[in-house]
Image: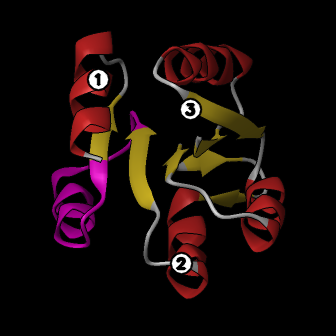
Amino acid sequence: MRKALVVDDEAIILWFFERALNKRGYLVEIARNIKEAQERLSKECFDIVITDLRMPGGNGTELIGKMGEITQKTKVIVCSAFVNSELSEILKERGIKVLHKPFKLDELEEFLETA
């Protein structure tokens, strides 16, 4: 079974991704902050990680930087309202998908198909 980790401090976002990913056959774990996400990533491998950028206690770019040390196989989607064009380009160059909040379900589905 494919495994996904969703990292966000907003409960509604976690709920949405958990439901959407479960329907597509993913076993989903959630992390409400960067520390929780790093703990899970140090113990388990995930096929996909979806992370917000701005959260209490750290940001998604820190997490992405540490993920490079953990695994190269994990696909990453950044889901945030705070991605400017420069950061978006940097993330895309690293093979990271960017999903701008608010987004539509079909955008997520498209990202999941390419992951």
Q: Nearer the viewer, residue 77 or 85?
A: 77
Q: Secondary structure at mark 3?
A: strand
As drawn, the label of residue 26 is 3
Answer whether residue 85 is magenta in the image: yes
Quick check: can you spot residue 104? no
- Mark 2 lies on residue: 71
As drawn, the label of residue 36 is none
Q: Position of residue 18 (x, y in %)?
A: 63, 22
Inter-mark Cα distance, 3 to 2: 19 Å
Residue at image coords 65%, 64%: 45
As drawn, the label of residue 109 is 1
Describe residue 115's horizontal placement relative to residue 62 as left or right.
Answer: left
- Amino acid on which the number 1 mark rests in the picture: Glu
Residue at image coords 56%, 74%: 67
Q: Position of residue 16 (x, y in %)?
A: 57, 14
Residue that protrudes farthest toward the bottom in the picture: 69
Inter-mark Cα distance, 1 to 3: 13 Å
Q: Examine the image and state in which quarter residue 43 appears.
A: bottom right
Q: Residues within 10 Å of mark 1 (few under 14, many from 20)?
A: some
Q: Residues within 10 Å of mark 2 (few under 14, many from 20)?
A: some
- Locate the N terminus by quadrant: top right
Q: Position of residue 29 (x, y in %)?
A: 73, 38
| Label total for image | 3
Inter-mark Cα distance, 1 to 2: 23 Å
Answer whether residue 73 is magenta in the image: no
